[in-house]
């Protein structure tokens, strides 16, 4: 791993294929369980430790995944139902400093992710090619993006943060 910020590399859009769709949808479906296993048996001191130098604590990271994927769920639903959409961004760094992130146990976010990802998977698993190609505006991106891009991004995002936690565990012999 050359850059600890990107343990699996940066997100790269892949062309649509049934095989790629199956892989990315499976990643969406499996993320809550993978995250749950990644944090298994971590104690309070581990959860309060940064997962990498200059990074959030593991607690913040787990809650961030829930925050981010709640936003993703809404973005998918909006992109499927609205025309000329521009999705809203959020200040993830500020969200990571709020009281819920600081005080609630990580199992709250893991439980939320189990339900959320079941809803998300069920909402998008049977989309047709026209729906995958629906476009919307995403602030910070120079051109409209597709729902297909969004699927790949959030498939990657979950794997990305699970890899952060696993790298932390490995570097600390946990």
Image: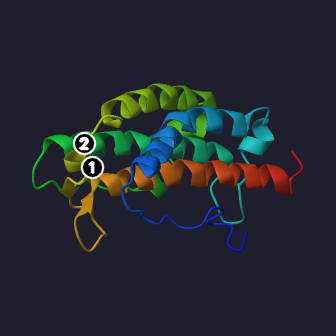
Q: Is residue 98 visible?
A: no
Residue 73 sits in quarter: top left
| In the foreground, 132 or 18 | 18
**10 Å crowding of disc 1: few (<14), some (14-19), many (20+):** many
| In the foreground, 40 or 27 | 27
Image location of residue 109, percent across then percent down: 54, 32
Quadrant where the N terminus sits is bottom right
Image location of residue 28, percent across then percent down: 48, 40
| On screen, residue 9 above or below 169 | below
Residue at image position (40%, 47%) is 18
Q: Is residue 29 left or right of residue 86?
A: right
Residue at image position (71%, 40%) is 38
Judged by depth in the image, the label closer to the viewer, 2 or 1, is 2
| In the foreground, 35 or 42 | 35
**10 Å crowding of disc 2: few (<14), some (14-19), many (20+):** few
Image location of residue 141, percent across then percent down: 30, 70
| On screen, residue 111 above or below 148 | above
Residue at image position (79%, 42%) is 45
Outermost residue toward the left? 83
Outermost residue toward the front? 18
| On screen, residue 174 above or below 120 | below
Say which mark, if any, is on residue 132: 1
Pointer 2: what residue? Answer: 128
Residue at image position (67%, 53%) is 163
Image location of residue 94, percent across then percent down: 45, 54
Q: Is residue 68 left or right of residue 97?
A: left
Secondary structure at badge 1 equals: helix
Instruction: Say whether marks 2 and 1 touch (CB < 8 Å).
Output: yes
Q: Is residue 148 visible?
A: yes
| On screen, residue 15 above or below 165 | below
What's the colour scheme?
Answer: rainbow
């Amino acid at each position: 791993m050359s850059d600890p910020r990107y343990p699996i590399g940066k997100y790269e859009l892949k062309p649509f294929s049934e095989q790629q769709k199956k892989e990315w949808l499976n990643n969406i479906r499996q993320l809550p369980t993978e995250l749950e296993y990644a944090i298994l048996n971590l104690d309070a001191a581990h959860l309060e430790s940064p997962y990498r130098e200059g990074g959030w604590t593991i607690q913040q990271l787990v809650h961030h995944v829930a925050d981010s994927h709640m936003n993703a769920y809404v973005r998918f639903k909006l992109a499927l139902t609205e025309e000329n959409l521009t999705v809203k961004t959020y200040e993830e760094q500020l969200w990571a400093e709020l009281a819920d992130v600081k005080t609630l146990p990580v199992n709250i976010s893991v439980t939320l992710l189990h339900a959320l990802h079941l809803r998300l998977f069920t909402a998008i698993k049977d989309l047709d090619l026209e729906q995958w190609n629906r476009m919307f505006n995403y602030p910070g991106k120079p051109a409209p993006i597709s729902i297909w891009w969004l699927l790949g991004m959030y498939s990657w995002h979950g794997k990305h943060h699970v890899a952060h936690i696993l790298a932390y565990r490995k570097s600390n012999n946990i």
